[in-house]
Structure formats: structure tokens, C-alpha cells
């Protein structure tokens, strides 16, 4: 009976579709590695980099569950459990930062997500090659300037003697010049439009790359059928951009809680702080300025968890809109 059982087990282990033994798989792995060791070895530095800078620092998230100070180490800091998270839930200033973050992020999502698509289509439809390159260069340029430079320009333009006030007074829109950056009620729009100005041109690169791969015969057939240019864009260009649009939408939605820290630190001041303070700047201020590392880490951990949930949710929704095909 035991011989029959052993024979049956051997037959089952070699059944088509079943996994080979671990030792056999390990041997096959090293055989594959030996055949391509030059190429395979090129991956090793990247793996080491990820382990050192991405996985080992995960241990530092334990600070969120401890009362950590600068005189402590990660191992000696006392555990406080979920106390830091309870403080977050009752912190008025944190929730103000959440409201500002979502307000600015939804404006950027509603306006800033669509503009690069429209701009890319407009550039693609240009017939003049030189003018197309000129428009692309001009639209890309702000992306390569840091927020220190662009923020200084905006601070100068929005001052009482700046360019915008001179234009508004000259056009009769306002009677007296005013420093626009000191008006907290206008900050959300300033942050949104300045971010679009900086990144809209750079955001067209992927869309233009996709449009360059569209078969020209589609447009020729549409012209023969009498389709207008707008009809061609709606029925040919946009459907072929669906996958990259879905991918960008997923990444944008997953980053709703991650407003631009550089932009905020440059444009925020004591007068507009109530509308300019976002989660990232609040975490920076609590951690670096006030030294409450445990609280700041707890906020960052909570934001990361919510961002992952938003990522998965956006991926599920877009996959249903794309015939159950995920772009991730």
C-alpha cells in the first residue's frame, strides 16, 4: 500500500501544470542567471538601492506608535499605541489642512487634468512644424524652473506695484492696487492656476507620444466619410488616448492628499496661512519646526494609507470603464 501511495505522489508531483519542487525551481533559477549573468547583474544595484532606501526605512514608521524625541532611539522610545492618531482626529488645525488640501487638489484635478489633454491635441493639430516646436518649447519651459524662481516671480507680480495690479487698475477692474497673495480667499485659485502654468506643458509629453502612434489612415478614412476635425478628434484621437488618460487619472486621484510642498512653502505667508496650509506643510511644520516627530509620522502614515485606498479605488473604477482591463 505504501508503494502505491509513493508512486501516486510522484505521479502527482510531475502532473502537467503542477509546480516543480523548490530545489528544482532554485536550480532552474541559477541556470537562467548563469546564462544571462551580465544582464541580470545590472539589476542588483537597483535592488540594493530599493532595500536600503525604500524597505529598511519602513521600520521608522514605528515612530508613529511611540513618543519619540531627539534624545531617544527607535528602540528606546516608549510605546504609546494609537495615542498619536487619537490626537490627530481631535486636532482642528490638521482638519483645516485637510480641507485646504482637498480644495486645492480637486481644483487641480478638475482643471489641471483636462488642460494638458486639450493643449496636447491643439499642438498635435498644428500643421507648421516650426511653430509646433516653438509652442512645445514655450509650454515646457516653466517645468524646468524651480518653485523658488517661479514663486519669486509670482510674489513680485502680485505685489501692490506688480504687473497684475497695474493691469487690473489699468483695465478698470479694481480701483486700488492690493497684494493678491495676502488675500486668503484667493489662494486656492492662485495655487491651482500657477501649478497648471508650470506643469501643463510638461503633461502633454505622454499624450503627444501616444498621438504620434495613431495610424494616419484612420484620419484619411474619416475625411473621406466627411468627418469634421472635431469629429475626428472625438472618435479617433481621444479613444486612442484612453489608456494613458486612465493611467494619469489614477495617479492624480491617488495623490489628492499630497499637495505641492515646494509651492506651499514659497507662496504661504502669515496672512493666507488659513487657506494655504496643506497636509504636507503641516507635517513639515510639526516635525521639523516643532520637533513632534511621532505626530508628524502618524499623519504621514495615515495619508499614505488613504492614498493607497484611493489608488485601488480609482484603478477599479477606470478598469470598469475600460472593459474590465486595468492599466496598472
Image (tube, rainbow, N blue to C red):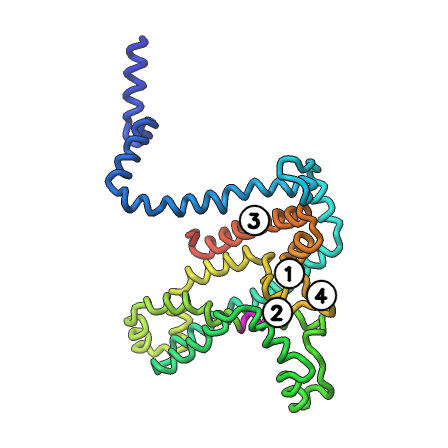
Label 1: element kind: helix
- What residue is disc 3 on? 309
Residue 101 is labelled as: 1
Marks 4/1: CA–CA distance: 12 Å
Label 3: element kind: helix
Q: Are marks 3 and 1 in contact (CB under 8 Å)?
A: no
Relative image position of residue 194 (x, y in whole percent): 58, 72
Indicate yes or no whether the magenta region holds residue 187: no
Residue 191 is labelled as: 2
Marks 3/1: CA–CA distance: 17 Å
Camera-side residue of 116 and 181: 181
Q: Are marks 2 and 4 in contact (CB under 8 Å)?
A: no
Q: Is 6 above or below relative to 223?
A: above
Relative image position of residue 90 (x, y in whole percent): 75, 49
Q: Residue at x 67, y 67 (%)?
A: 268
Q: Are marks 3 and 2 in contact (CB under 8 Å)?
A: no
- What residue is disc 4 on? 273
The quarter of the displayed image where residue 28 is located? top left
Amino acid at each position: 500500500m505504501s508503494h502505491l501511495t509513493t508512486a501516486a505522489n510522484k505521479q502527482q508531483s510531475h502532473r502537467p501544470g503542477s509546480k516543480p519542487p523548490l530545489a528544482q525551481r532554485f536550480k532552474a533559477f541559477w541556470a537562467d542567471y548563469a546564462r544571462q549573468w551580465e544582464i541580470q547583474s545590472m539589476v542588483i544595484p537597483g535592488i540594493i538601492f530599493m532595500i536600503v532606501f525604500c524597505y529598511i526605512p519602513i521600520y521608522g514608521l514605528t515612530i508613529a506608535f511611540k513618543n519619540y524625541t531627539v534624545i531617544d532611539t527607535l528602540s528606546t522610545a516608549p510605546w504609546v499605541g494609537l495615542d498619536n492618531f487619537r490626537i490627530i482626529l481631535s486636532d482642528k488645525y490638521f482638519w483645516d489642512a485637510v480641507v485646504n488640501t482637498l480644495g486645492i487638489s480637486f481644483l487641480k484635478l478638475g482643471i489641471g487634468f483636462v488642460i494638458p489633454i486639450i493643449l496636447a491635441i491643439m499642438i498635435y493639430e498644428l500643421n507648421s512644424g516650426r511653430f509646433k516646436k516653438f509652442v512645445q518649447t514655450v509650454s515646457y519651459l516653466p517645468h524646468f524652473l524651480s518653485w523658488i524662481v517661479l514663486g519669486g516671480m509670482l510674489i513680485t507680480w502680485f505685489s501692490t506695484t506688480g504687473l497684475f495690479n497695474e493691469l487690473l487698475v489699468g483695465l478698470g477692474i479694481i480701483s486700488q492696487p492690493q497684494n493678491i497673495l495676502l488675500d486668503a480667499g484667493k489662494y486656492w485659485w492662485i495655487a491651482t492656476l500657477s501649478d497648471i502654468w508650470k506643469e501643463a506643458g510638461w503633461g502633454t509629453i505622454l499624450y503627444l507620444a501616444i498621438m504620434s502612434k495613431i495610424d494616419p489612415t484612420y484620419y484619411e478614412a474619416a475625411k473621406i466619410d466627411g468627418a469634421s476635425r472635431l469629429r475626428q478628434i472625438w472618435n479617433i484621437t481621444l479613444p486612442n488616448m484612453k489608456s494613458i488618460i486612465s493611467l494619469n487619472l489614477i495617479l492624480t486621484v491617488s495623490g489628492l492628499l499630497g499637495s505641492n510642498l515646494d509651492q506651499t512653502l514659497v507662496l504661504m505667508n502669515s496672512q493666507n496661512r488659513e487657506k494655504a496650509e496643506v497636509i504636507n506643510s503641516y507635517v513639515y511644520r510639526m516635525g521639523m519646526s516643532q520637533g513632534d516627530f511621532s505626530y508628524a509620522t502618524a499623519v504621514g502614515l495615515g495619508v499614505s494609507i488613504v492614498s493607497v485606498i484611493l489608488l485601488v479605488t480609482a484603478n477599479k473604477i477606470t478598469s470598469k470603464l475600460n472593459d474590465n482591463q486595468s492599466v496598472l
